[in-house]
Image (cartoon, helix red, strand yellow):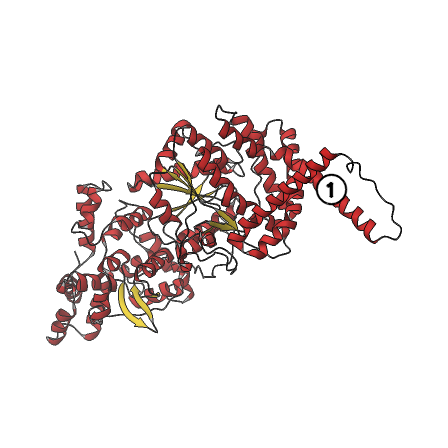
Amino acid sequence: MIPAWQEVGVVGKMAELAASELDYENYQIFVGTYPNDPGTQADVDAVCLRFPNIHKVVCARPGPTSKADCLNNVILSILEFEQRSNVKFAGFVLHDAEDVISRMELRLFNYLLPRKDLIQLPVYPFTTGIFNFTSGHYLDEFSEMHGKDVVVREAIVGQVPSAGVGTCFSRKSILKLVEEGDGLPFDVQSLTEDYDIGFRLKQWGMEEIFVRFSVTNNKLATFAETSRSRSKVAGNVVCVRGYFPESFHKAVRQKSRWIIGIVFQGIKVHKWTSDWKLNYFLWRDRKGVISYFISFLANIIFIQLLLLWLYQAFASGPYNFISVFSEDQIIVTLLACNLLFFLNRMLQRMIFVRRYYGIGQALLSVPRQLWGNIINFFANIRAIRQVIAEGDPRRVAWDKTEHHFPTVSERSLGGSLGSILKQQQVINEEQLIHVLENRVRGERIGQAMLRLQLISARQLAEALAYQASVECRIIDPFALDSKPIIQFPERLAFKYSVLSLGLEDGILVLAKESSLSPVAKGAIERMLQHKVRYVICQTGAVTLGLRYWYRFDLKCNPEPQLAQWMQTGELSVAAANTLREQYFSTQLMLGDALLQASMLEPAVVNQVMIGYDYESSLKLGAYLVQEQLISEEVLAQTLALQQAQQKTIVQLFAEHKQQQNGAPLI
């Protein structure tokens, strides 16, 4: 679940990274957008074209509302998707658009569900340079908070505050939140709905966990820090990474929102309890409104004393300032104790920063403490002013901070198939309009062009390959080398509709009739432990190849029959090529037939294909009926449609002879 307000250029990169990095496949991404944010909507639309498991949600109200309101719209869409696809999600994961997700995140969540109802991962900001103290102070605070504070908090009271990112909610907890909120699981007036929700779930007796799980394989911790002085265990934890504000103004805006949500809204919503242990941590959450002032004053006093010391040490004949505390033993003792506590705090912070980032960042955490105090002070002032101006902390609007995302890769999204074919001068505008007007419901544009005989199979394959920025290769599925096909798992071949062509320069080449999504490509590579690239071939080649090689359907090979007709003189070579192309182009998979019959939408078909076991004796149609996605009657209608469109070579030959004799086709 990703709430997105003015996230142009960010959401797409996150989806790209998730698809290429996540060691998981059975997941869906729902991005919440706003009707008055066309830029973000267009960005998400472009991503949805490339990633079949990404869905755009448009909120009912114009933005910005609040993160909670956006998430409520997203959850409603998820529950509707569940009804359409007849799946039930085990976990609902909360992320921001700029998050860099750990490769093992979903596997870890899947392991802990449904025993845990709220699962929180550590958050570790990216470093942005040794002199950038603004973003650097975030990594100091999160290192200590998620390395020590939240760990102790969970151990003592069993309550975990969500960080708003890297949080997984169980299905039970989401349904409970929906029920208690009368359809609105998140508090729409809260600026820190993540913090709020942790308390609500705890009150209902649900299990919460803050999990620090370390992976021993560095390949599974792709975006971890590389310092040699970091801890090999703590430095490889499954976590969320991201860039935090680098400018003073943006950091103050973000932290003021946190202060309003946790302190002012928190006091109003979450009262003190009868549990002194929980009250202690509530006090720790809320004391910032006081301690930020005191820390800032301490900074000023420290700077003043430092300047006086420098003046007395280096000035010629300096005035000797007399300390008002030098003769008071109690004050001297308190100052000494305070110094010890301060050194202890700095030492602890350095220890936890060193564990993930190394000794260099640990040493920098000391001067960054002073700058962090200044940021927190001005954020506190801003938060208080906003609360006073509104009169009620729950009326303060969502004050979003600008997000950045690390560059993953640049890939061309390509144009539409129609525009590409027009650009290549294969069709003109009138022909494209004719196709759009005469397309069968659910039929792809390319399939319609083939049916209307406006383009050849090669031209379609070349256009699709150009659109996907991959190689086009016309193949004979019946004459392929059998060894790479036999070695390639049948389950993967049918699941992703690919044929293995063998190794080329150490990379496994797969043939596919359309583009292979980055999610599927990444999943194949992880399962095979081998680099993969794909080429786009002509329509029907993979469909027939799968039947021929894996289902041993020798009758689907038209070559013997075509050769016989050419030998008897009933067909010329040109006519045989035309029949072969028509035969290939009429092949229709059951999933495509369901789309054409408008029985299932593309997103549902994609989810079904993920859940279906292709090695099972249960056929896909029977599986759909069993899962109550379609009825027996609908299956029969779809199979009839598939059979009507998927003509045999004998039927095509008969039609060819009728045309030659001038007889009308029935």
Seen from the viewer's position, the closer of residues 175 and 498 is 175
Q: Residue at x 20, y 46 (%)?
A: 623
Seen from the viewer's position, the closer of residues 616 and 373 is 373
Seen from the viewer's position, the closer of residues 540 and 426 is 540
Locate residue 261, reporting x and y percent.
55, 34
Seen from the viewer's position, the closer of residues 510 and 565 is 510
Residue on which disc 1 sits: 300
Locate residue 536, reporting x and y percent.
32, 65
Q: Is residue 218 above or below residue 502?
A: above
Q: Residue at x 34, y 52 (%)?
A: 25
**Residue 377 image-quadrant placement:** top right
Crowding near the residue tagged with mark 1, few <14, some 14–19, many ≥20 C-alpha atoms within 10 Å: some
Q: Residue at x 20, y 75 (%)?
A: 573
Does 459 sit left or right of 399 as displayed? left
User: Can residue 107 be seen?
Assistant: yes
Does 99 sit left or right of 511 as displayed? right
Quarter of the image where the C terminus is located: bottom left
Q: Is residue 425 above or below residue 376?
A: below
Quarter of the image where the N terminus is located: top left
